[in-house]
């Protein structure tokens, strides 16, 4: 049997084991999943599914954005796409909308920010630092608008959005999960189509054009896919930062390969990683339900600093 097949089988078994283990986490301890009462299982399984969906979507979106901007620090939350998606969701809630309107608004907000950042970044450049500064500014602007809408609203639904915005899987009730799942699947399908083109685009625009790659169409498809994935994740779990930066970088540095492979493996590992973080937080902090976004940020901050300082160490 080829070594790759052995590794794939081992990784699949490890993933299934972690899924089985995480289903049993709850009430400050662990139980055999088949011994959980029906009510607990009905509550636990949807949260497990949401964690997997959100983790996969954010990690795949991060892998795509890093290829698009040729920047390992690109992340849906750091460059403002998550903030744009959150703003779209809050505006729809403030107008009394719901259902399908929420993921559509999240997609529209994320797409608008992606297109804006892509246009400005191509116009003025700025490199790694310029992209981060631009993303921070747009993210802060979207965050200010979200805070203003929440402050001016007396709606209890909007008040509860405060917990959701911190990256809580417990508040994944603003949109039906099947809508978010459809958006995430569509985004992953687009990235699978664009994978080889992104590999060539990372060699430079002139090289890509000489090889017959439609650069503008590839960028637009990638932006659309990232917006679909980010919108799906944000509509379910609010803003979870750094996940889309950490997982793809870990995959690229440890496994490498084509961008399509990095996107798909990142989606897989990101789903499991977020589920483990959420389960661990629920277990260790019981009975407090700590938003998983806060837990991931505690890990993502040091990882971001390490990644940011790598080029500076190499230059010295």
Image: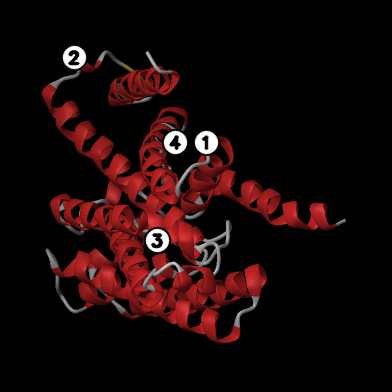
Instruction: Give the vertical position of 114 relative to 65 (above or below).
Output: below
> Can you tell which quarter of the image residue 10 is in?
top left
Viewer-nearest of discs 1 and 2:
1
Say what secondary structure mark 4 lies in. helix
The picture places residue 206, in percent across and down from the top left corner, at 53, 74
Q: Which of marks 4 and 1 is nearer the N terminus?
A: 1
| Residue 98 x, y percent position in the rendering | 14, 67
Task: Calculate the distance from the C-alpha at mark 1 to the C-alpha at mark 2.
Answer: 35 Å
* Earlier sequence position, callout 4 versus callout 3: 3
- Looking at the image, which is closer to me, 227 or 123? 123
Residue 307 at what x, y percent from top left? Answer: 66, 51
The residues bearing labels 1 and 3 have C-alpha atoms spaced at a distance of 20 Å
* View extreme (right): residue: 316
Query: Marks 4 and 1: which is nearer the front?
Result: 1
Secondary-structure class at tag 2: helix
- Residue at mark 4: 277
Label 1: which residue? 255
**Which residue is labeled 2 in the image?**
34
Q: Nearer the viewer, residue 85 or 216?
A: 216
* Tag 2 near tag 3, CB within 8 Å: no
**Which of the two discs, 4 and 3, sits closer to the camera?**
3
User: In the rendering, which numbered label is found on residue 304?
Assistant: none
Spatial CA span between label 4 and label 3: 33 Å
Residue bearing the label numbered 3: 197
For image coordinates 21% across by 64% down, the residue present is: 103
Tag in front: 1 or 3? 3
Q: Separation of disc 2 and disc 3 at Cα?
A: 46 Å
Classify 10 Å Cα crowding around label 3: few (below 14), some (14-19), many (20 and above). Answer: many
Give above or below for 204 relative to 282.
below
């Amino acid at each position: 049997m080829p070594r790759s097949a052995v590794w794939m089988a081992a990784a699949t078994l490890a993933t299934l084991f972690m899924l089985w283990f995480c289903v049993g986490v709850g009430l400050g301890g662990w139980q055999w999943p088949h011994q959980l009462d029906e009510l607990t299982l009905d509550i636990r399984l949807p949260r497990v599914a949401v964690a997997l969906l959100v983790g996969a979507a954010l990690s795949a979106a991060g892998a795509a954005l890093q290829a698009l901007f040729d920047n390992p620090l690109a992340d849906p939350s750091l460059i403002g796409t998550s903030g744009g998606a959150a703003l779209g969701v809050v505006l729809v809630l403030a107008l009394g909308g719901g259902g399908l309107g929420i993921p559509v608004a999240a997609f529209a907000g994320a797409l608008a920010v992606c297109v804006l950042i892509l246009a400005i970044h191509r116009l003025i450049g700025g490199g790694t630092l310029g992209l981060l500064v631009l993303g921070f500014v747009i993210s802060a602007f979207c965050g200010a608008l979200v805070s203003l809408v929440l402050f001016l609203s007396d709606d209890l639904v909007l008040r509860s959005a405060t917990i959701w915005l911190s990256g809580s899987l417990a508040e994944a009730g603003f949109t039906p999960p099947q809508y978010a799942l459809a958006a995430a699947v569509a985004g992953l399908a687009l990235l699978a189509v664009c994978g080889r083109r992104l590999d060539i685009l990372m060699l430079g625009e002139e090289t890509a054009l000489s090889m017959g790659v439609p650069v503008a169409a590839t960028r637009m498809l990638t932006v659309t896919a990232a917006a679909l994935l980010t919108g799906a994740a944000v509509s379910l779990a609010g803003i979870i930062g750094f996940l889309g930066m950490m997982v793809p970088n870990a995959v690229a540095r440890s496994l490498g390969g084509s961008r399509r492979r990095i996107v798909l493996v990142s989606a897989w590992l990101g789903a499991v990683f977020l589920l483990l973080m959420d389960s661990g937080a629920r277990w260790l902090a019981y009975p407090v339900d700590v938003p998983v976004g806060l837990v991931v940020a505690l890990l993502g901050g040091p990882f971001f600093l390490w990644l940011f300082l790598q080029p500076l160490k190499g230059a010295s």
